[in-house]
Image: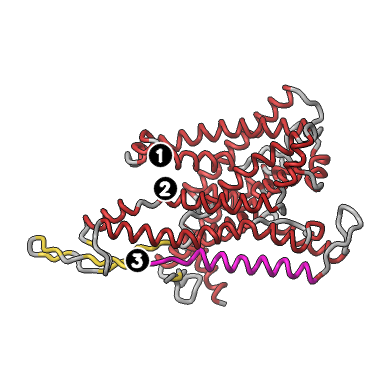
Amino acid sequence: MTLLRTLKNIFSIADLRRKLFFTLGVLVVYRIGAHIPVVGVNTAALALKIQQASLFGKLLGYLDVFSGGALAQCTVFALGVSPYITASIMMQILGFTVPYFEQLLKEGDYGRKVINQYTRYLALGLSVMYSLMYAAALESQGLVLVPGWGFRAIFVLSLSVGCMIVMWLGEQISLMGIGNGSSMIIFAGIVAHFPSYVIRTIEYARSGVLYHGSLPGMNWIIALAIWLSLVAITVCIIFLEKGERKIPVQYARRMIGNRVYGGQSSFIPFKINSAGVMPVIFAGSVLTIPIAITGFFGSMFPFMARLGQHFTQTAPVYNVLQFILIVALYFFYTALIFNPTELADIIKKNGGFIPGIRPGRKTAEFFDNVLTRLGLVGSIYLAFLAALPNIMIAIIGSAKMPFVLGGTALLIVVGVGLELASQMESYLIEHNYAGFLSSGRMKTRSAR
């Protein structure tokens, strides 16, 4: 009853209702475009290639999760928002490392507009590069009806224009809808696979055989165990994503004229996972390079084929490299986001201090120590989450898995869902409605 009353309250707020319907309308347009195929590709042979156990099929099947099936069907929206996301991450790193872009970030709204324009140009360049690589891969696999530069020109133009349209749709969601536009599009692409996952699991469990052949498939116990494990992983993600360490800050009293300012206490929240999903995305992008190289050249060079065997999902080398990359990139990304010395100086200038810690250098060292300890927990959590689907495949067996849902995809779904729920919660509280919880507020956990 509480949930139904909350849903009724959501649609009772005109502004929130308009944003929700606008977002749903844009996502419907995106899903329609994700079913318009590009001219010149044998989509039936492409779907069969993805179902096979080749390196090309594994790579394409992994990337297809984030496009909602558009990549496997080779549609005009096949690239989705991946080039734009990559361009945004690159510009964000440049904003912390290159003085010119760092200065633009300090110029307020004008600087952000210039950086956003650079991001769009970079996304266009990346979409052209990705389209050329995709066209070359399709031709090398014999999946093109009429190979040649004519096909490549049409293919690159179709996918690049489609990427720009998807980028524009995401920006419209951010401006007039609810939630972050790019995140909502990725969220919709991942969730679009869920009905097929459920149907495929039921079919496998009912028939007991694979769609590839007569190998023994799964039974109802394995099917139930897979979905229960996904629910358990989702609960763990929510539990850790809401966890944070609250650092108390006390502000001294100051007399200005006849008035007394300060004297109150506050806190600085440090999340357990302060880097989000970025380290996992970076690590995945780096590891797809050797997978793509060994997959494309494995048929021509035997040593490439042998090397490619170490870059499969269940290979120990792949999982160890993925774990190390995620941990290293987590600390690198956290160092870009947080500057303990700058944060300590801001607190000191405002007359604040941490109880028991001297202001200035000691406070900066304290922040650095807290971030290091939280970073160790957060990086191991992300690395384990990314490797968990590979562990499940190794335990259950790839022949019995009806689908592979990566930890990154689950983290994106849960993270976007929590952000969306928080935004709707704020609208409800603003209009004096009860929120999703009985207390009317989504709570965080305090990590000690």
Pick the front one: 262 or 76 = 262
Residue extent of the magenta highlight: 221-246
Q: Is residue 417 above or below residue 441?
A: above
Q: Is residue 138 above or below residue 215?
A: above
Pick the front one: 136 or 153 = 136
Quadrant location, the N terminus: bottom right
Residue 225 highlighted magenta (yes or no)? yes
Q: Amino acid at mark 3?
A: Ile
Q: Residue at x 80, y 35 (%)?
A: 299
| Disc on res. 247 | 3
Report the side of 21 relative to 116 (left or right).
Answer: right
**What's the magenta bit mostly, secondary-structure-wise?**
helix
Task: Point out residue 346 in the picture as x, y percentages from the top left corner.
Answer: 26, 54
Residue 31 highlighted magenta (yes or no)? no
Q: Confirm or deny contact between disc 1 and disc 3 (CB under 8 A).
A: no
Q: Which residue carries the number 1 mark?
A: 97
- For numbered disc 2, what is the local secondary structure? helix
Crowd rating for badge 1 (residues with CA inside 10 Å; few <14, some 14–19, many 20+): few
Crowd rating for badge 3 (residues with CA inside 10 Å; few <14, some 14–19, many 20+): some
Q: Is residue 285 above or below residue 200?
A: above
Q: Which residue carries the number 2 mark?
A: 336
Q: Amino acid at mark 1?
A: Thr
Q: CA distance from mark 2 to mark 1?
A: 9 Å
